[in-house]
Amino acid sequence: MANRPTRSVLYIPGSKERALEKATGLICDAIIFDLEDAVAMDEKVNARGLLAETLKTADYGNRMRIVRINGLDTEWGADDCKTFAAAIADGAKVDAILIPKVSKAADLDAVAALVPDVPLWAMMETALGMLNAHEIAQHPRLEGMVMGTNDLAKEMQTRFRADRLGLQTGLGLCLLAAKACSKIIVDGVYNAFKDDEGLKVECEQGRDMGFDGKTLIHPAQLEITNAAFAPSEAEIDLAKRQIAAFEEAEKNGLGVAVVDGRIVENLHIVTARQTLAKAEAIAALNG
Ligand SMILES: CC(C)(COP(=O)(O)OP(=O)(O)OC[C@H]1O[C@@H](n2cnc3c(N)ncnc32)[C@H](O)[C@@H]1OP(=O)(O)O)[C@@H](O)C(=O)NCCC(=O)NCCSC(=O)C[C@H](O)C(=O)O
Ligand SMILES: [Mg+2]
């Protein structure tokens, strides 16, 4: 869905009944209902059943509902696919299926064959996935990419740094692939969920790099993230002034305007209109 905001994408373990209920009232743009890493092995089967029933009955409003299945290389992946294909046919509201550890386009083909029609999202979190990001982004069923920075850091053997130096190549490759193919791309989680300042810095970095939003692990991270990935009042004001100045310049037969000492050309107007469209989409979401 073009323009659908994905500023804040909250993981909820599919096994946690209280968290599933709480999310109906949280200020997140999207929810990842997780059956993979957030669910213990002996809870996998129960979580699958609980989640399938919950998505038939619970009202998550206009929050996007994304189900993260287990990989098809695990004992749960194929049954996750079959259960959700059946649940969707039976009225469960699922906007996308998220596949973990996607390393090549064929990983998407395998899930596409088991779950018809629903858009697919890919966890980008393996070194091979980074190298194959473009072929993954080109997949016709793919709608969005999610950076899995914990798994990527593990495979890369990087250490945590505020500037995410060891992850930058992977983040950049995935961003290029997603943008070239007009797909949604959201950043990885910030593990220290009580560190607001650190989260803010990482959100700003992700926003500056071009991510559409960030994945989160705790409701306390929502407010900072929503603010960071929304156009600010100053950005909205600048966009309006750029459009007005450019229209005025055009009337005078000019192709360039100047706003705040900077040139404004047609391409800047595209960005300005995108900023206003994003602000409108967020306002519409908040009703
Ligand atoms: C991190 C947590 C285990 C902390 O849980 P808890 O100790 O229960 O937190 P609080 O007591 O502060 O919770 C306060 C209330 O908020 C609710 N809550 C907590 N977390 C969530 C949530 N994620 N969604 C919805 N609601 C949530 C609690 O129920 C409390 O409610 P109330 O009873 O009304 O007070 C916990 O936050 C958690 O489990 N988070 C999710 C962890 C997760 O999903 N991990 C997997 C995804 S990360 C990943 O794998 C990314 C990727 O693959 C990679 O490789 O990087
Ligand atoms: Mg992961």
Image: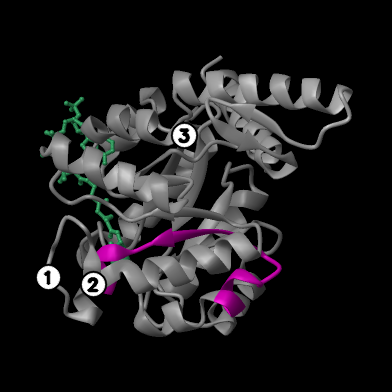
Q: In percent of the image, x 74 and y 40: which residue is there?
A: 266
**Beta carbon at label 3 within 8 Å of ligand 1:** no
The residue sitting at the top extreme is: 287
- Disc 3/disc 2 C-alpha distance (Å): 29 Å
Magenta stretch holds residue 192:
no
Q: Which residue is mark 3?
A: 29
From the viewer's side, name the closer residue of 240 and 103: 240
Marks 1 and 2 in Cβ contact (< 8 Å) = yes
Image check: 189 left or right of 285? Answer: left
Q: In percent of the image, x 58 and y 76: which residue is there?
A: 134
Count of residue discs: 3
Q: Position of residue 128 (x, y in %)?
A: 41, 85
Q: Which residue is mark 2?
A: 166
Image check: 247 left or right of 46? Answer: right
From the viewer's side, name the closer residue of 158 and 71: 158
Residue type (three-letter) at the residue carrying disc 2:
Gly
**Beta carbon at label 2 within 8 Å of ligand 1:** no
Marks 3 and 1 in Cβ contact (< 8 Å) = no
Q: Which residue is mark 1?
A: 159
* Between discs 1 and 2, the one toward the N terminus: 1
* Between discs 3 and 1, the one toward the N terminus: 3
- Disc 1/disc 2 C-alpha distance (Å): 7 Å
Image check: 165 left or right of 207? Answer: left
Q: Secondary structure at mark 2?
A: helix
* Between discs 3 and 2, the one toward the N terminus: 3
Segment colored magenta:
134-152
Asked if 245 appears above or below 202 in the picture, the reply is above
